[in-house]
Amino acid sequence: MGLQPNIGINRGLRKVIDNMIIDCHTHLLPRQAQQDRSEYLKADPAFGSLYSSPKARIASSDDIIHYLDKSGIDRAIVFGFPWESYETAKRNNDEVWEFHQRYPDRIIPFATFSLLERDLAYKETDRTLTGGFAGLGELSMYGLGWSLADFVALKPCLAIATAWQIPVMIHVNEPVGHKYPGKVSVDIRALFKTIKNHQDLDFILAHFGGGLFIYSLMPEIGQTMKRVYVDTAAAPFLYDSRIVSAAVNALGEENVLLGTDYPLLGISRYEKLLDEAEVHGALRSNILGENVLRILDRRLS
Ligand SMILES: [Zn+2]
């Protein structure tokens, strides 16, 4: 299936109300995997590492809309899974795009893929960003982790994202602490170098960027991380509420974004986190939606 012409993205992204709530991190997997994940578990070891437990929930598009409605969330960034099979990644991106077309004012489509085959990653970036996707991500290498070679493979994709001024979300987790499904090794130096070499691009580092933000307290690093954002995804499982002010203090009030990792968790756990962190007023509105809107508004058409 080719991408149908974009009907809603520019109109859909424009700010229409104050204090809009936007969840920047939700997953929609292919319909077939929603119905029966067994073939996918066999075919994709990275997927298996996250979803072999039946407790790992998989949401349908209806589940996502229902979740947004019941939670008072205006919009969500939706993406699939970085499948190692190009065809599966492409189909997943197409289904995310269909979802956006059904709900152009609510669903913001991001495209994701594996970097195992550099040429195919480039091809999918070109296809999806030209087709109207609003971002890349959540990019991750769940199999072997993020290596220097993966960040090198990402470079041509980042060039396209830069040309469109489209944000790139990368899965980054903390290098220490307990193990859990989806926790991978990340070559932090290679990640930082990638950020440094792309100063005119917005990076959203998922899961509080594995703590990388702390180095932006070093003056020369702070200069380099001006367009680095972190999301809150999975934080209730990982951190106490002081993580919020730590990230705000290190990166800035405009650099922390609400991401829930739905269907892993819903928004209420994050509202509790913000309550515990005593985040209110303008900062809370920024985190809950205004910050990500500013990023999305930079997209060139
Ligand atoms: Zn992630």
Image: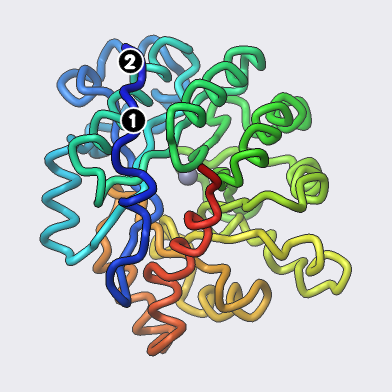
Question: Toward the viewer: 160 or 226?
Answer: 160
Which residue lies at the image location 64% right of the left edge and 32% below the top edge? 160
In this view, 192 is above or below 15: above
**Residue highlighted by disc 2:** 40
Q: Position of residue 209 (x, y in %)?
A: 60, 56
Per the rendering, the mark at residue 208 is none
Quadrant containing the N terminus in the rendered view: top left
What residue lies at 30% left-to-right and 43% top-to-bottom?
8
SS class, disc 2:
helix
* x and y, in percent, of residue 216 in the image: 76, 68
Identify the residue shown where x is 29% and y is 35%: 28
Quarter of the rendering containing residue 37: top left
Residue 215: percent from left, percent from top = 77, 66
Counting every numbered tag in the picture gives 2
| On screen, residue 81 above or below 68 | above
Q: Amino acid at mark 2?
A: Tyr
Q: Residues within 10 Å of mark 1 (few under 14, many from 20)?
A: some
- Other residues around mark 2 within 10 Å, as few (<14) / some (14–19) / many (≥20): some
Q: Quadrant of residue 246?
A: bottom right
Q: Is residue 208 left or right of residue 92?
A: right
Residue 180 in percent (x, y) is at: 46, 44
Secondary-structure class at tag 1: helix
Task: Of the two numbered discs 2 and 1 on the same chain, state the one appearing first in sequence.
Answer: 2
Q: Amino acid at mark 1?
A: Tyr
To which quarter of the image does residue 23 belong?
Answer: bottom left
Rounded to the nearest angstrom, the CA distance separating label 2 from label 1 is 9 Å
- Image point (33%, 61%), residue name: 22
170 left or right, relative to 257: right
**Contact? badges 2 and 1 (CB < 8 Å):** yes
Residue 51 is marked as 1
